Image (cartoon, coloured by chain):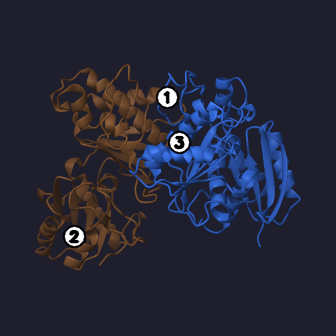
Chain colours: A blue, B brown
Amino acid sequence: MPRFGGIEAGGTKFVCAVGSGPQDLETIEFPTTQPDETIQRAVEFFRVRREIAAVGVASFGPIDPNPQSPTFGYITSTPKPGWRNCDFAGAVARALGLPVAFDTDVNAAALAEHRWGAASGIANFIYVTVGTGIGGGAMLDGRLLHGRLHPEMGHVRIPHDRARDPFPGNCPYHGDCLEGLAAGPAIEARWGQPGKLLPDGHAAWDLEADYLALGILNWTVTLAPERVILGGGIMQRPELLPKIAARLTELLNGYMAVPDLRPPELGARAGVLGAIALANDLLNDAPRGHTVSRHN
Amino acid sequence: MPRFGGIEAGGTKFVCAVGSGPQDLETIEFPTTQPDETIQRAVEFFRVRREIAAVGVASFGPIDPNPQSPTFGYITSTPKPGWRNCDFAGAVARALGLPVAFDTDVNAAALAEHRWGAASGIANFIYVTVGTGIGGGAMLDGRLLHGRLHPEMGHVRIPHDRARDPFPGNCPYHGDCLEGLAAGPAIEARWGQPGKLLPDGHAAWDLEADYLALGILNWTVTLAPERVILGGGIMQRPELLPKIAARLTELLNGYMAVPDLRPPELGARAGVLGAIALANDLLNDAPRGHTVSRHN
């Protein structure tokens, strides 16, 4: 069984792994500091593990995952200090002399859930994470969705009834887009305490379910997924998933098939497992058509 | 140059054509009556034109365009009398003994605009029509988008400020979804006269542009298109496109690249030309990966 390297690059931490899948995975975590230092730490982890054939990177964004672009493999316009216009994939490829695949964290997680988890055998689905932000990746007809660069699904606009919810939204770009109304920081700002401290049955959860159902409705009429996988810290609250499913059924009102809503099966390892899967596909001529151009 | 048959099946009329593209197209139109009668009329038009190698159908919906499905080629749950669960592609294929390709009217129009019109050379774009209803087709990475069956983009939900616009929306399924607020019948119901009779500069056009910009924003954050082609009767109003573009730029607020908005180039022929293109691709092993399974 060939083994690969994977990096899940988040805004606060890096998870690196070597392995071939969920049953064979050695991981390490460290904080995200400056690019040189952080990428160097990942490279050292891989360097002593000589058996790997390629590396996959599942990155926070915005990024350029288009293999035809001169800035393929870059993190582009992030506000994160030091990381703007950073040639992430190129730095890893040069340091290791290995081919590097590069995609968004959410597309990588979608790929991992497709290969080993909650989207096994499903060709059309969305993977959504609801946490500090809201992000979505998608597979359509077995291929990861990119579009021009990649979607920003959390920034979809939804109806916002200010009589019911006077909170104005806290997305610095869009105010009351879905992320501005329903990500963790919005919950905390609206209710004066983090979601984690709000009890089961609190009004926060009905409101949250309604907002997420509206977001899922908008993605559903646009992409027609068979399934939507809902992960992230906020989705740890057990009452949310059934509330969202009930509301989504009401909202679609029989007009289209209601996608099946599921929790992820790979949990916190989805991102780094997706990076491993990206690396694997890079050497298998991209059977799923996602971003796998060689970069070395 | 091989020639093909094309059917654009609309709720009120059929357009049939034989040809190879915009420079070589013989067309006929007749009203949509009962399925047997209407399909028979199309079949007779093709039967006397023996040179065609395949037929493409660009249909009103909802439809089943999935070649792996037992109901591939059917119009499914339409309220249109007689057409529900109608084996449209099968009836054409059996009558003519020819392979038949089958997709939505909007996906076909997208394909035609890609091959011969406003999306030439663009791999990621949306084609939207704003008329009696609002519908959207999309090409992603050079392949037509289907998902489970096909999107219903017109039914996306958007913010609706009832202080500015007390009209409740007239979508029979969703009330104030985009179609319920911004399609032709909504304009007529809100202002008491058809859009055609409202003068340039009327407040209707600012409101319409704002609603369409919100819809395009939602599709854009979900699909990341490079371009959006805006057709249909309502888009004949010249002031709309620049107003929508300005509003969309404000709404995206620098967060993602603003897709290029364009009018269609093929006008009323886009649908039937798309049907011709679907038929052509059916015989060329589906270079763009859309729905082209043989059905004969």
Point out the residue furthest to the right here: A48
Please give the label number shown on residue A160.
Answer: 1
- The one nearer the camera, A48 or A245, is A245
* Amino acid of disc 3: Ala
Q: Height in image: A280 above or below B121?
A: below
Q: CA distance from mark 3 to mark 2?
A: 47 Å
**Spatial separation of the CA atoms under disc 1 and disc 3:** 13 Å
Q: Which residue is mark 2?
A: B3
Q: Position of residue B207 (x, y in %)?
A: 33, 25
Which label was assigned to residue A213?
Answer: 3
Crowd rating for badge 1 (residues with CA inside 10 Å; few <14, some 14–19, many 20+): many
The residue at 73%/38% (across/down) is A11
Q: Quadrant of the N terminus of chain B?
A: bottom left
**Mark 1 belongs to which amino acid?**
His
Q: Secondary structure at mark 1?
A: loop
Q: Label 1 vs label 2: CA separation?
A: 52 Å
Give the residue drawn at x 50%, y 39%. Answer: A214
